[in-house]
Image: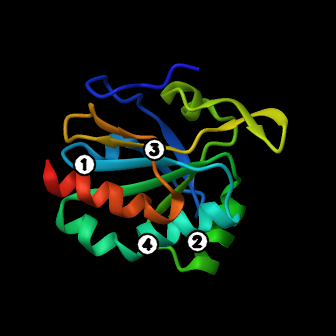
Amino acid sequence: MKTLTAGQDAPQFSLADQHGNQVALSDFTGKKVLVYFYPRASTPGCTVQACGLRDSKAELEKLGVVVLGLSPDTPKKLLNFASKQDLNFTLLADEDHAVADAFGVWGPKKFMGRVSDGIHRTSFLIDEQGKIAHVFDKFKTKDHHEVVLDYVQAN
């Protein structure tokens, strides 16, 4: 697993959102995009992380940042997650984890002594030209939104 780094071009993708509509990264050319990968909708850590971003959406928008959450869940599961948590940003279904592979965030994980493949919780800030501006890979789920906001405000 080789995670992409700042300065590299972000892989282009198009995935179904929680409503079944196709959303492409290229739809946001000219804007900053936070592409955040999370393991599974409606799990405790993923819910805390998503709700932090939901509550920070206005601040992120003021800074010109669009949020896209990606997981290997189906659009139906994503819609349920978004509805239940009143999420105000786009969730994308990377069911075959092809986009996670392209970003280098799919690979072996250890949980309770067991190793299995899955998404490594990582976020990428993509600049207006489609380049990776920053990689967020060291944060707690409850602080993720603050780490992102602090970085964007400082840069």
| Residue drawn at point x = 50 percent, y = 56 percent | 140
- State the separation of the CA atoms marked 1 and 2: 22 Å
Which residue type does callout 2 highlight?
Ala
Count residues near mark 1 (Cα–Cα under 10 Å), then give few for <14, some for 14-19, many for 20+.
many
Residue of label 3: 138
Q: Is residue 64 left or right of residue 21?
A: left
Relative image position of residue 145 (x, y in whole percent) = 39, 62
| Residue drawn at point x = 24 percent, y = 48 percent | 32
Kindly check if marks 3 and 2 are in contact, taking CB atoms under 8 A apart as contact: no
Which residue type does callout 1 highlight?
Lys
Relative image position of residue 102 (x, y in whole percent) = 52, 25
**Which residue of the protein is positioned furthest toward the left in this rendering?**
155
Residue of label 1: 32
Task: Give the camera-side residue of 59 and 109.
Answer: 109
Count residues near mark 2 (Cα–Cα under 10 Å), then give few for <14, some for 14-19, many for 20+.
many
Q: Tell me which numbered mark, 1 or 4, is placed earlier along the sequence.
A: 1
Task: Give the camera-side residue of 76 and 57.
Answer: 57
**SS under mark 3:** loop
**SS under mark 4:** helix
Residue of label 2: 82
Kindly check if marks 4 and 3 are in contact, taking CB atoms under 8 A apart as contact: no
Q: Tell me which numbered mark, 3 or 2, is placed earlier along the sequence.
A: 2
Which residue type does callout 3 highlight?
Lys
- State the separation of the CA atoms marked 1 and 3: 20 Å
Relative image position of residue 153 (x, y in whole percent) = 17, 57
Q: Tell me which numbered mark, 4 or 3, is placed earlier along the sequence.
A: 4
